[in-house]
Image (tube, rainbow, N blue to C red):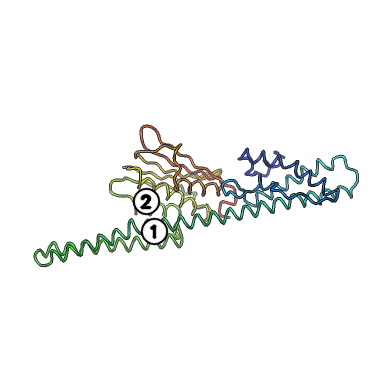
Amino acid sequence: MIGGLRSARSALLTNADRLRQLTDQIDGILDDAERCMAGVPAESDAGLSAAIGTSRSSDGLPPTESMRAAGILFEVALDVLTRDEPDPARVATLARCLNESITQRVGRAATAYVTALLERNRRSQREERQRVAREMHDRAAHSVGVALQSLDLHDVFAGREPERAAAQLVAARQSLVEAIETIRAIATEVRDALGGRDLGEALTAYVNRFAGPQIKSMVRVAEGTAALSPAVAEELYLIVREAVYNTFLHADATRLEVRIEIDEAAVRAEVLDDGTGFDPASATGIGIASMRERLDALGGHLELTSPLSGGAGVRAVVPLPLPARRR
């Protein structure tokens, strides 16, 4: 069975727990087949859903992986049951019983997986609403507030200091322009996170929009990222955006570097800063959890580093099977 999974490049091999659970399910499938041959209905249990799919999005597998593993299970179990069976009719009946048992279990697993995806989508929508509200409050509303303050000062200076009054009008106009640009940028990202841009352009625009004059920033994106599917590129953008936002909000950094590298095996996104750092072991905030969830859904993982000397690194690694690339 392991050889079959390896030949199929199954994601099950990346999770020892799940692989052990899958192996354990063979006994249950054999029991189902025995009851089926005796005319007894199969017991209703979670079966393969524990190994091939689950209600938790972080542990579940896509249906394609479930079906691949189920096919391998069918071949292994059929070989065990029919190795010494000379009767073709019984072999056919055993094959039918095995197919029924495995199909029912995979069906339950697929239902759990879809439920997990719907829950993840609901959480993502909630997080996006919170992000939009945060940016509207922190940036757009702030700029409008500054504009109103400048207009109030214009009224104060209008009668006695015309030059200062005129300067306040200029400041108000600039603040309102910034507010409009912020609202337009937020609206664009709500409609399409990448906004029709490639990954490098979108990340550069985001960093430039939020990096203050005290931060020296750099974005380096490998040319090969153009081969990423839109879904993978957008998820990577959202993951890196969260890491960059955390740097701006918490790190008190003077340098920020974003790197995206890609090869045949994986795409790697890294955000580095020279700020105050953090304790990776206790980094369990909503932003970190969101990044982990997105990476789990892509079959990837998150690496956090923060040396004692200061600074921090957030590294997202996503394996690249063929479906992740544009065809």
Q: Which mark is residue 207?
A: 2
Q: Residue furthest left?
A: 160
Q: Is residue 134 left or right of residue 110?
A: left
Q: Which mark is residue 133?
A: 1
Q: CA distance from mark 2 to mark 1?
A: 19 Å
Circle 2 packing at 10 Å, graded few (<14), some (14-19), many (20+), is many
Res 133 quadrant in image: bottom left
Whether 115 is drawn above or below 14: the answer is: below
Q: What residue is drawn where x is 49% and y is 52%?
A: 235
Residue ID at (52%, 57%): 122
| Residue at the extreme top | 308
Within the image, what quadrant is residue 83 found in?
top right
Q: Is residue 75 left or right of residue 161?
A: right
Q: Quadrant of residue 79?
A: top right
**Three-letter code, disc 2:** Val
> What crowding class fits label 1: few (fewer than 14 Cα within 10 Å), some (14-19), or many (20 or more)?
some
Nearer the observer, 212 or 322 = 212
Q: Secondary structure at mark 1?
A: helix
Q: Which mark is residue 255?
A: none
Percent of width and height locating residue 131: 41, 55
Image-based side of 45 in relation to 323, left or right: right
| Quadrant (top left, top right, bottom left, bottom right) of the C terminus | bottom right
- Residue 223's place in the image compared with 166, above or below, is above
Quadrant in the picture for the N terminus: top right
| Residue type (three-letter) at the residue carrying disc 1 | Ala
Q: Where 302 falls versus 228 (above or below)?
A: above
Give percent across and percent down for residue 157. Answer: 13, 64
Q: Nearer the viewer, residue 144 or 163?
A: 144
Horizontally, residue 100 falls left or right of residue 224, namely right
In the rendered structure, which disc, 2 or 1, sits on the residue that comes first in sequence?
A: 1
